[in-house]
Amino acid sequence: MKSFLIIAASFVLLISSCRKNKPVNPIDQLPPETQTGANTFGCLVDGEVFKPGGAQLSGGSLGCNYQFLGTGANGGYYFRLSGVKGSGNNQTAVGLFTDSLKIQEGVKYLLDSSEKGKAYSHYSNLANGSSQNEWFYKTKKTNFGGELWIKKLDTVNQIVSGTFWFDAVNANGQKVQIREGRFDVRYTR
């Protein structure tokens, strides 16, 4: 009887070790879409999961500011949200910005170019090359762009949440696709 149990147990172990691991959907690895100020940020960069982390020596891996700088020539509302992954010469970063543009809850903004009154985005990958032409990508007016959707803006508790996607290009014409972006952060003024 003991030999039968040993053979049966060995067979069960053999069968279970032959099962293939179920592939993980990259979207399932992103933070959930919340609106509580959970300080989360994530997206897919060319299909690969991007979540900030590992850049503590350079001032933190997730930062958000939303401020009004007055009504003068350099005034207006400015929004900056950036996530950094890695450290040193092995950093990647995703950033969303506005220049002289007040954001509002429930509004989708076209991610265009870095001009007054517009929203725009950047992606950088320092490991990609030694010159800025190789590692710095930005949205442009033609052929590239994206969308930033502010789903929650709580100016009392300083929380901003939403989703985004964009295509960006570097100076050499190489393209990067950012998809399924989501964030839920507390901002500073």
Image: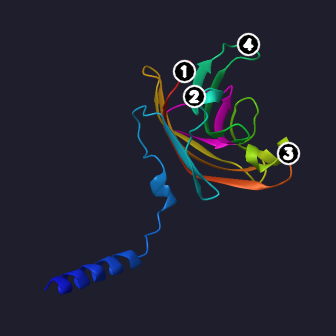
Distance between the Cα atoms at labels 3 and 2? Answer: 26 Å
Residue 8 image position (x, y, % from top left)? 23, 83
Q: Which of pointers 3 and 2 indicates the residue nearer the eye?
A: 3
Tell which of 22 and 182 is nearer to you.
22
* Up/down of 85 relative to 2, above or below: above
In the drawing, what numbered circle is on residue 72?
A: 4
Distance between the Cα atoms at labels 1 and 3? Answer: 31 Å
What amino acid is found at the position of numbered circle 4 in the picture?
Gly
Callout 2 secondary element: strand
Q: Residues within 10 Å of mark 3 (few under 14, many from 20)?
A: some
In the drawing, what numbered circle is on residue 64?
A: 2
Residue 129 image position (x, y, % from top left)? 81, 48
**Is residue 103 inside the magenta stretch?**
yes
Distance between the Cα atoms at labels 2 and 4? Answer: 23 Å
Residue 176 seen from this side: yes
Q: Residues within 10 Å of mark 2 (few under 14, many from 20)?
A: many
Tell which of 4 and 94 is nearer to you.
4
Callout 4 secondary element: loop
* Earlier residue among tags 1 and 2: 2
The N terminus is located in which quarter?
bottom left
Distance between the Cα atoms at labels 1 and 4? Answer: 21 Å
The residue indicated by pointer 1 is: 188
Stretch in magenta: 91-111
* Earlier residue among tags 1 and 3: 3
Residue extending furthest toward the front: 2
Residue at position x 49%, y 32% from top?
Answer: 185
The residue indicated by pointer 3 is: 133
Residue 138 seen from this side: no
Distance between the Cα atoms at labels 1 and 2? Answer: 6 Å
Q: Residues within 10 Å of mark 1 (few under 14, many from 20)?
A: few
